[in-house]
Structure formats: C-alpha cells, structure tokens
Image: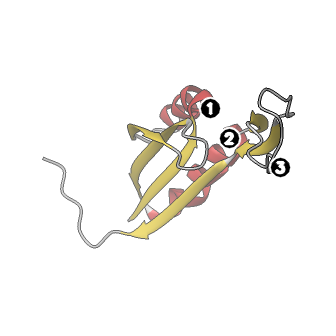
Amino acid sequence: MKLIMAIVNNDDGPMITAQLNKKGVYTTKIASTGGFLSAGNMTFISGVEDEKVDEVIEIIKAYSRKRTQPVPNLDVPVGQIAGGAVAPAEVLVGGGTIFVLNVESFTRV
C-alpha cells in the first residue's frame, strides 16, 4: 500500500476529486497555501493499493493545468521615482506536486 500526497491548484481540485471518486479512490482534501505566491492550493491525501498508484498519478497529471499568473515586479531600480509604472512579471504556476510514500501499516476503524 502507498500513501499519495498531491498538491494542486485550487481551481483544479474539484475535477480531480470527481475523477478520483469515479475510479473508487477515496481521498482527504486539505486546503493549503503555497509559499511563493501565497495562492490557494488543495492537498489530497489518499491511501491506495500499489497497483493503483500509476492510475491515480495519471488522473492528477491529466487534470492539473499549468497557467501563467502575474506577480508584482519587485526588481525596482534604486532611485526610481515613486509611482513609476513597473510591469508585472508572469510566472508559470499550477500543475501538481505528487509524493508517493510506502505505508507500513493501515487500519480502517
């Protein structure tokens, strides 16, 4: 048995939940926040049999969309006049981060 922990963008969470439920994969969802943009994420925790790990990962990959997001440009030159327009930078966000861990013991009560 494996424990899968997957961190995805909040926008992708509902579709991933629906697809995992269709396949009989039950999961616990936890609201989380990313450190870089302080954006909302959803963290899934699922205990699955070894043979289902690849299927779960494929679902998460298929429904975790990458997107660009503007962020304030903090590289303001020294001495720049206050109120000067600085174009926001764009960064690639989304996708997912997936951890697969071995489970030593599992008990459902």
Query: Marks 1 and 3: in contact by CB < 8 Å?
Result: no
Which residue is pictured at 51% across the width and 62% down the height? 99
Asked if residue 92 lies left or right of residue 56, the reply is right
Position of 76 compared to 103: left or right?
A: right
Marker disc for residue 64: 2
Q: Which residue is mark 3?
A: 77
Quadrant of the rendered image containing residue 37: top right
Q: Is residue 79 above or below residue 48?
A: above
| N-term mark: 2 or 3 | 2
The amino acid pointed to by label 2 is Ser
Q: Which residue is mark 1?
A: 12
Binning the other alpha carbons within 10 Å of mark 2 as few (below 14), some (14 to 19) or many (20 upward) gives: many
- Asked if the residues shown at circle 2 and circle 1 are in contact, with their CB atoms under 8 angstroms apart, the answer is yes
* Percent x, y of residue 78: 79, 51
Chain-order first, disc 3 or disc 1: 1
| Relative image position of residue 72 (x, y in whole percent) | 73, 37
The CA span between labels 2 and 1 is 6 Å
Q: Amino acid at mark 1?
A: Asp
Mark 2 or mark 3, which is nearer to you?
3
Residue type at mark 3? Pro
